[in-house]
Image: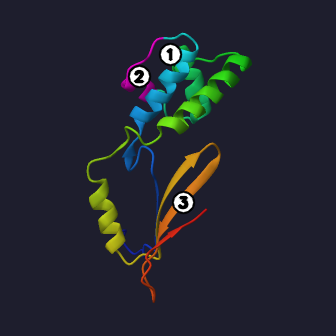
């Protein structure tokens, strides 16, 4: 966890896919979107294989069931709205911490850091949850907008 000849002052960790397995939530939202188009549900592993290039690409891939699939603009717009509506409704329902995530965070919290933060990018917004070491205060957590 330490780098040679370097002082670690802050750590920023992405939440989705790094600390938490959110693929089940993403698959649930994608399959609900697909249902609105009369399409059959895909296995979680299949939807998870579409993740990695952002939600916009995921919508195209999930609607076509193809890694390089694309749909017309009207279908995409309807699908994107449906995906985000459903993801907002199910986000966090089936997500789980990856093995070792809790221990790693505890170890980082015990390090001499100025800041430890997790981030979650959603709909072009980044949310940060930041934990700073207590200096002269009983409070150790600070939520950032």
* 1 or 3: mark nearer the eye: 3
Q: Evaluate if marks 2 and 1 touch, with contact meaning CB atoms under 8 Å apart.
A: yes
Alpha carbons under labels 2 and 1: distance apart: 8 Å
What residue is at 50 percent from the left and 25 percent from the top? 30
Give the residue pinned by disc 2. Answer: 46
Q: Nearer the viewer, residue 79 or 72?
A: 79
Give the residue pinned by disc 3. Answer: 128
Question: Is any part of residue 69 visible from this angle?
Answer: yes
User: What percent of the width, then of the height, locates residue 49?
Assistant: 43, 27
Q: Nearer the viewer, residue 118 or 113?
A: 118
Alpha carbons under labels 1 and 3: distance apart: 33 Å
**In this rendering, would 121 be left or right of 131?**
right
Give the residue pinned by disc 1. Answer: 65
**Mark found first going from the N terminus, 2 or 1:** 2
* Depicted 123 relative to depicted 139: above or below: above
**In this rendering, would 74 be left or right of 19?**
right
Q: Name the image quarter holding residue 82.
A: top right
* Depicted 32 relative to depicted 95: above or below: above
User: What percent of the width, then of the height, locates residue 6?
Assistant: 42, 74
Disc 3 on helix, strand or loop? strand
Disc 1 on helix, strand or loop? loop
Instruction: Tell me where the magenta segment starts and ends, as one range.
Output: 40-49
Q: Name the image quarter holding residue 138.
A: bottom left
User: What percent of the width, then of the height, locates residue 24?
Assistant: 39, 33
**In this rendering, would 32 be left or right of 19?**
right
Q: Is 53 within the magenta? A: no
**Mark found first going from the N terminus, 1 or 3:** 1
Q: Evaluate if marks 2 and 3 touch, with contact meaning CB atoms under 8 Å apart.
A: no
Question: Is any part of residue 52 visible from this angle?
Answer: no
> Badge 3, how many Cα within 10 Å: few under 14, some, many 20+?
many
> Badge 1, how many Cα within 10 Å: few under 14, some, many 20+?
some
């Amino acid at each position: 966890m330490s780098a040679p000849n370097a002082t670690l002052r802050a750590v920023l960790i992405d939440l989705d896919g790094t600390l938490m397995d959110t693929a089940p939530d993403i698959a649930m939202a994608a399959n609900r979107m697909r249902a609105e188009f009369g399409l059959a549900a895909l296995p979680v592993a299949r939807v998870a294989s579409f993740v990695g290039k952002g939600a916009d690409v995921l919508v195209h891939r999930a609607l076509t069931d193809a890694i390089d699939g694309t749909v017309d603009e009207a279908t995409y717009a309807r699908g994107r709205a449906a995906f985000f509506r459903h993801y907002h409704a199910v986000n966090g329902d089936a997500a789980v911490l990856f093995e070792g995530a809790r221990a790693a965070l505890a170890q980082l919290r015990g390090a001499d850091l100025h800041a430890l933060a997790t981030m979650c990018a959603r709909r072009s917004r980044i949310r940060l949850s930041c934990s700073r070491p207590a200096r002269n205060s009983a409070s150790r957590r600070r939520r950032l907008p």
